[in-house]
Amino acid sequence: MSRPVNNSVRPSVVIVGAGPRGTGLIERLAANAPELYGDAPLDLHLVDPHPPGGGRIWRRDQSPLLWMNSTAEDVTMFTDESVEQAGPVRPGPSLAQWAAAVRAGEIAVDPGLAEAVAALGPRDFAGRRLQSAYLSWVYERSVAALPSSVAVHEHRRPAVRVSGSRAGRQQVWLAGRPAPLLADLVVLALGHLESELPPEQQELSDFAARHGLVHLPPAFTADSDLSALRPGEPVLVRGFGLAFVDLMVLLTEGRGGRYVEGADGQLTYRPSGREPVLHVGSRRGVPYHSKIGYELSGERPPVPRFFGPAQVDELLARPGGVDFRRDVWPLIGKELGFAHYHRLFTAHPERTRMNWADFEEEYAAADPGSPALGALVGAAVPDPVDRLDPDALDHPLAGVRYPDGEALQEGLRGWIEADLARRHDPAHSPDLAVFLALLSVYGQLVRLGDRGPWWHGFFSYLASGPPGPRLRQLLALSRAGVVRFLGAGTTVTADERRGVFRAGSAAVPGEWVAARALVEARLPEPTVERTRDPLLRALYADGAAATPAGLLAVDPADARILDRAGRPHPRRFALGPHTDARSGGAFARPRTNAPAFRQNDATARALLTFLRARATPTVPASPRTVTVPAARTAPTPEDSHAADH
């Protein structure tokens, strides 16, 4: 199967990042190796200062109060028959199925997780510590599935630089290690990274330093030092997504507060007295939509239909390039509408005035966003509540004004209550069809490269919001006065004269809140120009291409890194949110043809195909290297191919 090239050197691959994305790649290497690589030798180096499986974001040592935002049955690390890939499907358990196996005694976990495992049902939201255990188990299983000729080495250090010519072996330099790792191929699977502050954030940080204020820039909330946010003091929070939810949890329950459920099911918050007062706002002014609280019955929406491979092929073939708003967004809008109306007509026909076959034919013939399409929907769907308007969804409070701040609080609580009711009512099941269509759209968009930040925010707002119980807690905190809403179009200014931050919004014109603390509740933008990761910075400085939004440019076919002439590097690959092929996440909902799984498979096959001609079956592993087929994750002594900490 293989042809030796250099009998003195074992082939070697370095994967930088051993979190969920790196783990998923290992699973695909194990699945594809029998076909593409056989029993040829290989050194596989995993470089990450954090434990493999969970990595930094999903590490175990974070607050037990923090949850996932997907139900246990909607989380898997394994491919299935829906995934469009050349490699074989290797079935594995979802998080819910894994927990059931733990309860049955088939899988052993840390005894400290026993209570969490026992309480987890398929529709429950697991704590992140439990997800960390699942990811660690997936990692161990994937390593054990590799051929016995593959030696796995863990390096608990950050990688700082990659050097080497396009034609030769690469050198991967690790912090605190004088000699580099030698690699035939390098894969960056870095996950979410910290960034240098953009100009506006730097100005706010400098202002805070001059006046003795607190400014917490964009960051992974679990890593932020929140101790400077003092009890009882107002804190401005800009951002209303999942980072805000984590912040809310850590500053309330995390400081000793608790919730009490009344006979009517309503939560009441009992403060500890250590909470600050959070004044939260954003562009939309509302939290992300609640996760949908019911399952789809009957037929799934038949997508892709109006935004699938054929449409993407046509877009890629356009000589003048593609503009997202002009060329892509209308097709997405039509695709989402198709899923919505398909569900409405097939599951709730009493709310329509036309049979589905006729509507579908006319819908297909109408141009996206055209008057003809609007007239068709108006005639066939009498209640405006049952019509889909994606642009209106993105501006839920457009034109809404309140006479004062208290009216705004009441209005926003009403909006959240209505959202919770709708997202848990199967009568509105077209919302779930739209969610499934959004997943399909995301999978198609991977081929188009950088879409800019707006699309990812819109997707997250509709499809990646918090669990319903978190919004019930938010309502309780609002009623208790611990959270105050700022409204849509929130603006924050630095008041140099008074030495405070000031925030206001279009929702209550002329009303402002002053505070000595400002928190930017969102992740840093993943830009290669401003990343604090030295390896990515060095790659960019050495000529790696970046998109206008600052993402690392990769070949959508196999994730090879592109240079500024558009040439794929033969030996360097990148997967994850810092690339222009970023997908919705490293793990996914089962049976959704997840983009990350497709990418992992394509990259694994590209790695193995490249290595096949260079494999050296006659060269054994170093005697100082641990090579145990069933468990090859223990540290080994330090040398050029050994694991180290």
Image: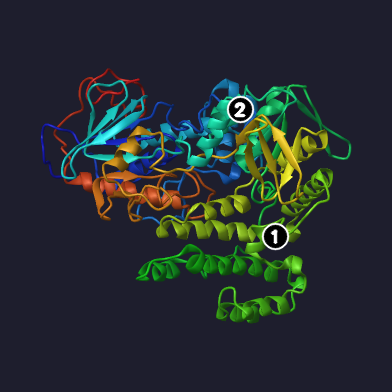
Res 218 visible: no
The three-letter code of the residue at mark 1 reads Ser
The answer to which quarter of the image holds residue 163 is top left
Viewport quadrant of the C terminus: top left
Mark 2 crowd level (few <14, some 14–19, many ≥20, 10 Å Cα): many
The one nearer the camera, 116 or 564, is: 564
The one nearer the camera, 182 or 618, is: 182
Query: Which mark identifies residue 429?
Result: 1
Q: How is the image coloured?
A: rainbow
Q: Where residue 547 sits: x, y (%)?
A: 38, 52
Closer to the chain start, of discs 1 and 2, is 2
Identify the residue position indicated by label 2 in the image.
Answer: 214
Who's the residue at 63% across and 40% down the image? Answer: 493
CB of mark 1 within 8 Å of CB of mark 2? no
The one nearer the camera, 465 or 578, is: 578
Query: Which mark identifies residue 52?
Result: none
Q: CA distance from mark 1 to mark 2?
A: 44 Å
Res 96 visible: yes
Who's the residue at 75% across and 60% down the image? Answer: 427
Q: Where residue 323 sits: x, y (%)?
A: 45, 65
